[in-house]
Image (tube, rainbow, N blue to C red):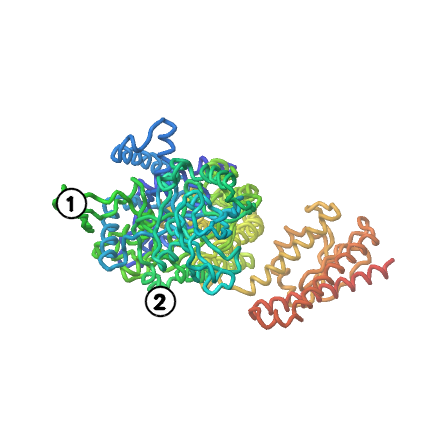
Amino acid sequence: MTDLAPKYDPNKVEKGRYQKWLDEDLFKPSGNKKAHPYSIVIPPPNVTGKLHLGHAWDTAIQDTLIRFKRMQGYDTLYLPGMDHAGIATQAKVEAKLREQGKDRHQMGRKAFVKQVWDWKDEYASIIKAQWAKLGLSLDYSRERFTLDKGLSKAVRKVFVQLYNEGLIYRGEYIINWDPKLETALSDIEVIHKDDKGAFYYIKYPFVDGSGYVDIATTRPETMFGDTAVAVAPGDPRYKKIVGKELVLPLVGRHIPIIEDHHVDPKFGTGLVKITPAHDPNDFAVGNRHNLKRINVMNDDGTMNGECGKYEGMDRFDCRKALVKDLKDKGYLIKVKPIVHSVGHSERSGVQVEPRLSTQWFVKMKPLAHAALKNQDTDDKINFVPARFEHAFKQWMENIHDWVISRQLWWGHRIPAWYNKKTGKVYVGEEAPKDIENWRQDPDVLDTWFSSALWPFSTMGWPDTDAPDYKRYFPVNALVTGYDILPFWVSRMIFQSLHFTHKRPFNDVVLHGLMRDEQGRKMSKSLGNGVDPMDVIHKYGADALRWFLLNGTAPGQDSRYDPKKLGAAWNFINKIWNASRFVIMNLPEDAQPAHMPDTSKFDLADSWIFDRLNHTVGEVIRLFDEYKFGEAGRELYNFIWNDFCDWYIEISKVALNGDNKELKTRKQTNLIWILDQILRLMHPIMPFVTEKLWLSMPHDGKSIMVAKYPETHKEFENRQANEDMAFLIEIIKAVRNIRMKVNAPMSSPIDIMIQLDDEKDKHVLDDNADYVENFLHPKKLVVAAKVAAPKLAKTAVIPGAQIFVPLTELVNVDDEIKRMEKEKKDLEAEVKRSTKKLSNQGFVAHAPETVVNKEKAKKADYESQLTGVRERIQELKESK
């Protein structure tokens, strides 16, 4: 009846399936206006290269949520798109051109930008193919790009409005400068690393020849821009020299000694050289004292005309030559090696140069204040885990103005024009009409400026009547890594609140970083990155998705572990084999799964349906709380342990028997439970569940549009759960005894079961068929008190003691030794539990359910320990 192969092969299962979903238009919203909308926008990957495991993690969570909500009847939108990634993409293309002996300046802006568009088209197609491999149910009819026409319009509107509101301004400030890419960087595009450096102690002589002061610096090449030396106000060591002038070594320029509160008198010599054009603190000092700003470097990090004979030298070459000359001229006092934290460009890796520059800025305080204020309202954003709200607030409270201009050619051109004659600035969404008289600002906007608008610009904003904007914004959940919280998440929040007066998303779900097996961050330099496509080729997309979702708790880092991927494949293979067994045991005219009649249930039926009901309820709750790891454990335990290891095995009794009515009931139950399992698993494992679903009797529709399981009150049966758990413990105990003495499972043996409570006897009496099939008793005695034989293998379980007479197989001394070990283990558990419950901190602060659970465990251990002690005594007396 089935075409399912004996072994699960992910490559065969997944081949062609995604295209069929696309052909059937299953990824688009339902169009059901009565259904609640549910939307997620994909965090747009950069078109700089292929997707990595972090992207796979993001999207596996997003797609699981979308598929889950789609099956629950929501009108779902999962919107795809990509980011132009200004600096990163331009750097990649420039590197490629350099290999070809080409230079963007020689090519010109138009030709270079065309080259970048070609790059974008190539990598966008690669990314889309990877999305398909991952099984993402994206609505490609709504795909967006941060440089497309609609988003460009939104960017211009935002820039112009912020400018008109006085929140965007152009000014001269110290910014982070990347000398390799020759562009400004924001603070969060700078990575600080420990570098070897030195303090250079230099003599700055007094103009009057009365001596010198000792100045320490880590960047002697900037001394050409020194315009003062500062001391702390009131520093008694330097009262007499304040106001005197110094000669700048090798330059000869005269600079004053001033007082300023910026100086820490306890640090170093208490004298600080002031270089307003090359240090943010010195810039502030210069403003307070009206000092001249002298920029000493060119855009590429070489020294400029202010540096005399050092002009044209690289900044670090200049440092070496300058230090040598200072030493030769008697100005160098000493060099003290140090290791210090130095900023590096996130994109090019070179040391960042703090540098005076005219740039465009966003005034952040008002925007940040509004975002912080919103967190005190009912419209606040829910951070998952909640602790990241503190990180968000901290960043907002300590925010600096945002430098948004970049000296690049790839990106959104700044919508500002300068009159060629008057220099007047015009800022507008469209170019001036007499364009021949105007010159557009050559810079582009920071990538994050357009990405910050992503949740609403992709929905059609600034057209507030756009259908998608009205229906699907704000989006329900944003899923991304915690490392991008300040870069992107925070900016989306303040831009959305300012322009739409709404939060951009209800929930922001933050996962950690994917690390290698040793716990190291994956990076190109370490060569420890993992291509998710390689993982899919070996294990399948479903195994990768299961690994990513089941691996960790929200906000926690995870480690890539091939062994866990192998375990994921094994789990899918278990589902495959169970499905194959169920389907092959259905009659030829089997109908699609339908609700079984609970009045005909036996114990195993009542138990498995109660367990299914519990699992459905827990998985829905945990999915809604974004606790995918916990949901995965619930699913795994039910499918592998309860359904496969027990219920299927128990059902074989009826399936192989002569009772046709009983056989039919078991078939009905099995196909219903399998139907529910496949629905439960589909959001995580879309490919294999679709294949198995289509192999079952069904209505011809995809599982993707099937209804997600719900709980049914008629399936609740706590007593059946307890009774079946008791029966399973007995079966497991007897199996363990057989295994220890190498007695075949099929050989009949005498079994004696002594019950703590005789009312439990009905469990064994009512399920005689299961007892016969799983215990194979030659003689079975069940009573409140049994005459335990002197020589027997013994097991103590909650509610009973089990004795298997094995006179010819067991050595009494060995059995006593085994029981003594069991006693020791139980004593340790009782001691541990007692200690835990005597800890007032645990009892007072742990949830009541946790404390009660620990008390129940302790009582259980004590009961088992009593039985073990009694049996040891009996064995000793039998000798």
Q: Which residue is at 68% across, 47% downward?
A: 745
Q: Secondary structure at mark 2?
A: helix
Report whether residue 17 is seen: no
The three-letter amino acid code for the residue at tag 1 is Lys
Left or right of 557, for residue 489? left
Mark 1 residue crowding within 10 angstroms, few (<14) / some (14–19) / many (20+): few
Query: Which residue does the numbered mark 1 point to in the structure image?
Result: 421
Extreme residue in the left direction:
434
Residue occupied by mark 2? 373
Where's residue 394, x and y in %?
43, 61
Q: Residues within 10 Å of mark 2 (few under 14, many from 20)?
A: few
Frontmost residue, 641 versus 406: 406
Residue found at x 76% / y 59%: 824
* Quarter of the image that includes the C terminus: bottom right
Q: Position of residue 872 (x, y in %)?
A: 80, 61
Point out the image quarter for the N terminus.
top left
Looking at numbered disc 2 in the image, what kind of residue is underneath it? Lys
Tell me if I can see residue 297 in this picture: yes
361 relative to 181, above or below: below
